[in-house]
Image (cartoon, rainbow, N blue to C red):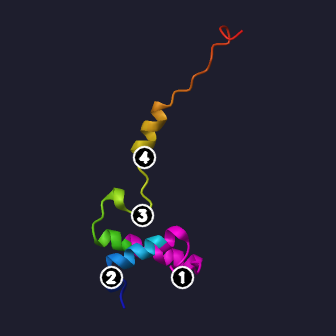
Amino acid sequence: MKLENLIRSITPEIYTNLKTALELGRWPDGTKLTREQKEHCMQAIMHYENLHDFSEGERLGFIDRSKKEAQDEAQILSIPDSKTTH
């Protein structure tokens, strides 16, 4: 079976199960995913998301840097003046 056909055969339920297994590092029966299985799950998830035009924010591994930058800007380091602390 070609990869494209395999990805097209993934249902939303299978996609969710693959994501959950990857997040937990275990299959639903509790068996640990091997390194190779993790890689295959990740590839299948990424291809599925691409095929179904998921937005950037919905995709596996998305990091919203705009929120991080806003938090960093909001945190101001305050250093006491040594003259006023004595």
Q: Is residue 22 magenta?
A: yes
Q: Position of residue 17 (x, y in %)?
A: 43, 76
Q: Give the mark nearer the N terminus: 1 vs 2.
A: 2
Q: Residue extending furthest left?
A: 53
Nearest the viewer among 28 and 63 is 28
**Which residue matches tag 4?**
65
Front label number (3 vs 1): 1
Q: Give the mark nearer the N terminus: 3 vs 4.
A: 3
> Is 72 placed left or right of 30 in the picture?
left
Q: CA distance from mark 3 to mark 4?
A: 15 Å
Kind of residue indicated by mark 2: Glu
**Which residue matches tag 1?**
29
On the rendered image, what quadrant is the C terminus found in?
A: top right
Label pair 1/2, CB-CB below 8 angstroms: no
Q: Which secondary structure, mark 2?
A: helix
Q: Give the mark nearer the N terminus: 3 vs 2.
A: 2
